[in-house]
Amino acid sequence: MKTPGSLPAEKMTSKSFLYRQTPNLITSARLALVPVVLYMLLEFWSDPWLRFVAMLILILAASTDGLDGAIARRRGLVTNLGKILDPIADKALLGGSLIVLSILGAVPWLATSIILVRELGITLYRLAVIKKKVIAASGGGKFKTVMQIVAVCLVIAPFGFLGDWYLVFTQVVLWFTVALTVWTGVQYLWPKK
C-alpha cells in the first residue's frame, strides 16, 4: 500500500544511490575536468585570455576536493573508495598540469620530476598497505596539495606583464612547494609514533 508522499522503490533506490555517491561523483567530475585543463593549456598557451580560463577551470576542479570531503564527512559517507579516488584525482589534475607546463617550458622538469616521484611513490605505498589500513591524507598533505594548486595557478596565470618580480615570486612559491612535497612524503613514510 502506498502512503501519501511515499516514492516508488526504484525512485527511493535512485535517490538513495545519489545521496550515498555524491562525494564520489564530485571526485569523478574533477577527474573529468583534467583533460579539459590539459587540452586548453597545450592548445591555447599563447592566448592570455584562454590561459586564464584554463586556470579558472583548474581552480574549479581543485576546489571540488574540499567539497567532496566535506559532504562525505557531514553525511557519514567516508568510504575506502573515496579515500583512494580523491588523491588520485588530485594527482591527475596537478601532475598532468605540471607535465604540460614542463613541456611548455614554464616549469623546470626537475621540479615536476620531484613532485611526480613523491606523488607516485606515496600512491603506490598507499595501495601496497591498503589491505592492512587505508591511509587518508594528513593535514600536511592537504596543505601541500593547496600549495601545489597555488604554484601551478601562479605559473599558468598570464601575469608576466607585471614584471620580473612576479616571475621570481612564482619560482619561489614553486620551489617552496617542491620542498613541502618532499617533506610531507617523508612524514607519510616515517610517521610520528
Image (cartoon, grey):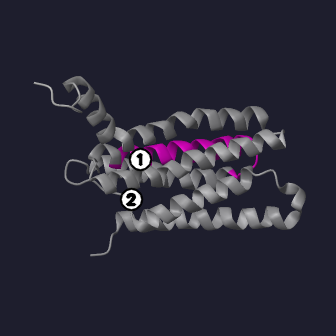
Is disc 2 placed on a helix, strand or loop? Answer: loop
Residue 136: in sight, yes or no?
yes
Q: Where is residue 78 in the image (x, y as percent from the top left)?
A: 29, 51
- CB contact under 8 Å: marks 1 and 2: yes
Q: From the image, tell me which residue sits under label 2.
A: 137
Residue at the image point whose x is 39% and y is 56% from the top: 70
Inter-mark Cα distance, 1 to 2: 9 Å
Residue 66 sits inside the magenta stretch = no
Q: Residue furthest front?
A: 4
| Residue type, numbered disc 1 | Asp
Instruction: Work out whether residue 87 or residue 11 is closer to the camera in this orientation and state it.
Output: 11
Q: Where is residue 175 in the image (x, y as percent from the top left)?
A: 65, 64
Crowding at label 1, few (<14), some or many (≥20) Cα neighbours within 10 Å? many
Q: Where is residue 71 in the image (x, y as percent from the top left)?
A: 37, 52
| Residue type, numbered disc 2 | Ala
Residue at the image point whose x is 49% and y is 37% from the top: 29
Residue at the image point whose x is 20% and y is 47% from the top: 131
